[in-house]
Amino acid sequence: MNLPSLFRTPAIFAQFPGIIAAESTRHGGISPAPFASLNLGLNTADAPENVTENRCRSFAALGPGCTESQVASSFQLWVCECAISY
């Protein structure tokens, strides 16, 4: 069986061979709906044990020995506002 990748690598990072850059595809996780897959968010209503397992899977996919302390991640904020600057 061919499983989808847990992450994709943005092409812009190809020029930095010492860096592993990855964007989650959300495939391969255990979180149920409404997250429905590889939810990596620590600040969500998903069960903490689901997020922990998803993060372990994600880090393992990045390479042997990859741990949370070696990963830099972003914090997304979803709002219904728009700022326009002139």
Image (cartoon, rainbow, N blue to C red):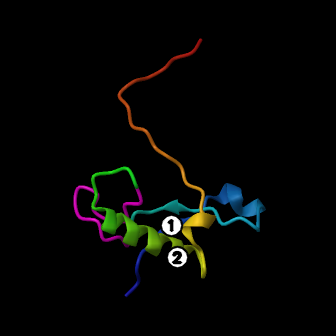
Q: How far apart are marks 2 and 1 (CA)?
A: 8 Å
The magenta segment: 28-41
Q: Is residue 1 within the magenta segment?
A: no
The disc labelled 1 sits on which kind of residue? Phe
Which disc number belongs to residue 20?
Answer: none
Q: Would you place residue 19 above or below residue 45 in this image?
A: below
Mark 1 burial class by Cα count in 10 Å: few <14, some 14-19, many 20+: some
Residue 2 at what x, y percent from top left?
41, 83
Rendering quarter of residue 21: bottom right
**Magenta segment, principal secondary structure?**
loop
Q: Is residue 31 within the magenta segment?
A: yes
Element at badge 1? strand
| Residue at 55% across, 66% down | 68
Label 1 near label 2: C-beta < 8 Å?
yes
Q: Would you place residue 65 above or below residue 7 in this image?
A: below
The number of numbered badges drawn on the structure is 2
Q: Which residue is identified by label 2?
A: 61
Residue 76 at what x, y percent from top left?
46, 43
Rendering quarter of residue 67: bottom right
Instruction: Residue 5: tell me if it is visible.
Output: no
Q: Would you place residue 25 above or below residue 82 in this image?
A: below
Residue 61 at what x, y percent from top left?
52, 76
